[in-house]
Amino acid sequence: MAPAGLAVSAVLLLVVAPLVLSPFRLDLLAKYLCYAIVAVGIALAWGRGGMLTLGQGVFFGLGGYAMGMHLKLAEAGPGKLPDFMSWSGVESLPLLWKPFANPVFTLVMVVLLPVVVAVLLGSLVFRQRVRGAYFAVLSQALAAAFVILLVGQQGLTGGTNGLTNIQHFFGLDLYDDADRRLLYLIVALVLGLAYLGVRQLAASRYGQLLVAIRDGEDRVRFLGYDPALVKTVAFAVSAALAGVAGALFVPVVGLLTPANLGVVASLELLIGVAIGGRYSLAGAVGGALLFNYAKTVFSEELPDSWLYVQGALFVVVMVWAPRGIAGLAGQLRDRWARRGPLRPVSYPAGADRPQEVST
Amino acid sequence: MGALNQLVIGASIGAVLLLAALGLTFTFGQMGVINMAHGEFIMAGAYTAYVLQPLAGGQAVLAALPVAFVVAGLLGLVLERVLIRRFYGRPLDTLLLTFGVSLILQQLARDIFGAPNVQVRAPGWLTGGVDLGGLRIPYNRIFILVLAVGCVVGISWYLARLKQGRRMRAVMQNRQLAAVSGVATERVDQLTFFVGSGLAGLAGVALTLIGPVGPTLGSAYIVDAFLVVVAGGLGQLRGAVIAAFTLGVLNSFVEFWTANGASFAKVVVFAVVIGFLQVRPQGMFVLRSRALS
Amino acid sequence: MSEALLEVRGLNVVFSGFHALTDLDFTLRRGELRFLIGPNGAGKTTLIDVITGLTRPASGSVRFDGRELVGRREHRIVRAGVGRTFQTSVVFEELSVVDNLDLAAGFRRPLPALLRRRRGVSDAVAAALDTIGLGDLADRPAGVLSHGQRQWLEIGMLVVQRPRLLLLDEPVAGMSRDERDRTGELLRTVARDHTVLVVEHDMDFLRRFASTVTVLHEGRLLCQGTVAQVQADPRVQEVYLGRAKEAA
């Protein structure tokens, strides 16, 4: 996005929206902005790095639960148990929960937990050159396993209900409109920082390298780089962003349940990016906002047809606009120039066929 | 005794996984298509049995097997013809595309059959079970196992002996070569999709024997089914069989050993698959070829 | 001065029963420009694949500057100083010519430099641009390059890596006469201060630009020597040149 576009967006989000929107609508926008933060990470991992991650919900959840645990403990007060624990008959605070009473520890964990999981998965999987569809399937399986784990540990995680009834956020009263506006501004600022940071990363040599790996991983290996490392870094950055987004989602919405981060939720995080345009950061952010806005509208007006619309969106975007809205202009230009569809990405023939014997 | 019992439960989980994954080894294996709507084909198979119930009564399950195969197969064929064939060479886009289709099919099922789960009555001869020295194996579990084994035997026979099957294998191993050798690869793709999706229909009928039928029936199995294919190796029947039963047994033992095990089982299975890929990144069996990916 | 840079000893490569290389011994001295020839299936590309870590041998060793390369991962071998090109050149089409070179020159860069945008053109990249003669196209996307220009860009990408050994896999395949001449000149320039091993099919090119030649046949070393010696060898004529003549 050009500096002018950036400035206009910043004014719209930071000044106009808080002035114009009702507290209810501003809350919704704050929620969409959380999803947009995840979208920035997905645009980096998927758009630039070619890693179709169907498990962003896991990182969103790790960040969210870390924050949620802290807020629940703060809510309960020193020495007391969070409400759901007493309902499920837990008598003393589980060991896992204890350190989350510390706010600094919590903030570190919001980023660190997703990063550790992403680095672990990424280094194991990318090192073995498991990629493309395989990686997508594995990341989805991780999301499925994670949700089942959360649901099963009722006493530790609140089970299906998750962590609910969160009323305060580091001194902010979440039932107070002014405080909520402040929370909204925090979310908007974090999104801005995420956007600028990832934009810088994408424009750097590292960003070029990432795209080069997407287009020819084996070739890059022969330039002396370790593609597994480069990809793992991008995956970890996207995980960290999802974790931060999850942590902000908790005070914004007031709860976090496994349904917010399962297989379907993870795919919903993705479709916004696909609609907006996976190769464009601004497109990814816009797409996430648009998709979630559409979801709200339909859930209010025609709840039964939302799944049809959502399903159709996947189909329409993939068939007619694989580069998303942001890519439509380029796509039309291509058609105009009668160049036909996008040229397929070429791979180094020699590198892709390591065991070829001919000559 | 406990271990043996878990083994039997594991085998029956494995049989269900295998049925769900069998079709994927075709569509994912041969064509590289990640069909997320495969789960909804399973669901369609299950509802087929439900629809046939008023007609076939207690024998609905038996009557449904061939019908569900055709119903799910035709769904797959239509999906392939209308959408997927524009997407060859774009596996990740196909995944998102078919996920959209799966959402539409789920809502369609909800609109047609209602959101609450429905029940398919098992035939009388499938109630009860055999007693093996204190160990009771329900007949319906045995039926699913037999069905899974039958499908595997049928498919191997088909691939090895029949002309269409050999063509399918040829396309699976080298699409370009098969095309220039005069194999009509498009026709083979259609057939592959029909058979692969039809197998999902059979899996759906089998699932009616062990639980209620609902719009999200298939999505509960699809992720595990893909794990089976990834661990087994693309397009590898042997691999899928071994992977399905291994994961099934692993699942049942973890559930048995750990308190509140059900919630850990999936995590353990996932970790084992990742660990396994460290040793065999391309799955258990790899199509022997000098050309890679 | 003529100590060995690359020593291949007792190399065996087997592809599901097919012996691609059998008990191969091969030595390359520092500063040498060597051509590797042989009929189809002789194992030329396989040898390069083993040296660069793409293919694992069944047995044998590849020592580069005294260090074992077998078992190392590809990018580690590149970092040790062995660079290669591929039969089908692959450049990053969306990146400009300069960016391609900059990327290739980059693996030694410290992390902070990697996280910054490229500003200006480094001396090494400028020198490489000059060597391969693509200065006019520096800021064009590599996708617009012709086949010949791509090969030169690949060679340029190799040179900026500052490798001590260059492996070129059929650099002039598919080139016009004119392009071959330019590639030959480029090869001479590069060979002045690098050790180079070239796999090549083109006999005419070989006669004009090669000094020493190694001939492989069915995975074994057939003979070695100057172009004249090799051409005079009756075994070579039988397995290779003879057939080439028949074919021509």
Image (cartoon, helix red, strand yellow):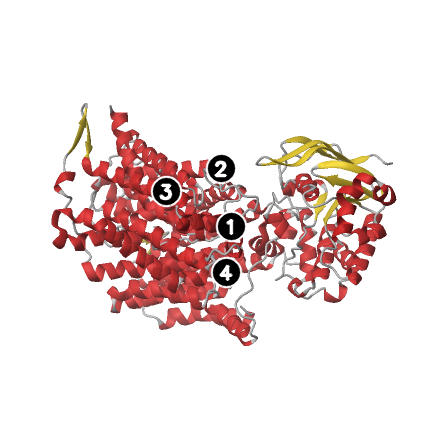
Kindly state the secondary structure of the residue where label 3 is placed: helix
- Name the outermost residue toward the front: C246
Crowding around mark 2 (Cα neighbors within 10 Å: few <14, some 14 to 19, many 20+) is some
In the foreground, B162 or A135:
B162
Discs 4 and 2 share one subunit: no
The residues tagged by marks 3 and 1 sit, at their Cα atoms, a distance apart of: 21 Å
Mark carried by residue A195: 4
Discs 4 and 3 share one subunit: no
Residue under label 1 = B174
Residue under label 3 = B157
Q: Which of marks 4 and 1 is in front?
A: 1
Chain under numbered label 2: B
In the rendered image, the vertical position of residue B277 relative to residue A344, given as above or below: above
- Name the outermost residue toward the bottom: A336
At x 30%, y 68%, the residue is: A297
Crowding around mark 1 (Cα neighbors within 10 Å: few <14, some 14 to 19, many 20+) is few
Residue under label 2 = B280
Kindly state the secondary structure of the residue where label 4 is placed: helix
Label 4 close to label 1 by CB (< 8 Å): no
Discs 3 and 2 share one subunit: yes
Q: Horizontal and vertical percent for residue B202?
A: 27, 48
In the foreground, A146 or A27:
A146
Amino acid tagged 4: Tyr
Label 4 close to label 2 by CB (< 8 Å): no
The residues tagged by marks 2 and 1 sit, at their Cα atoms, a distance apart of: 22 Å
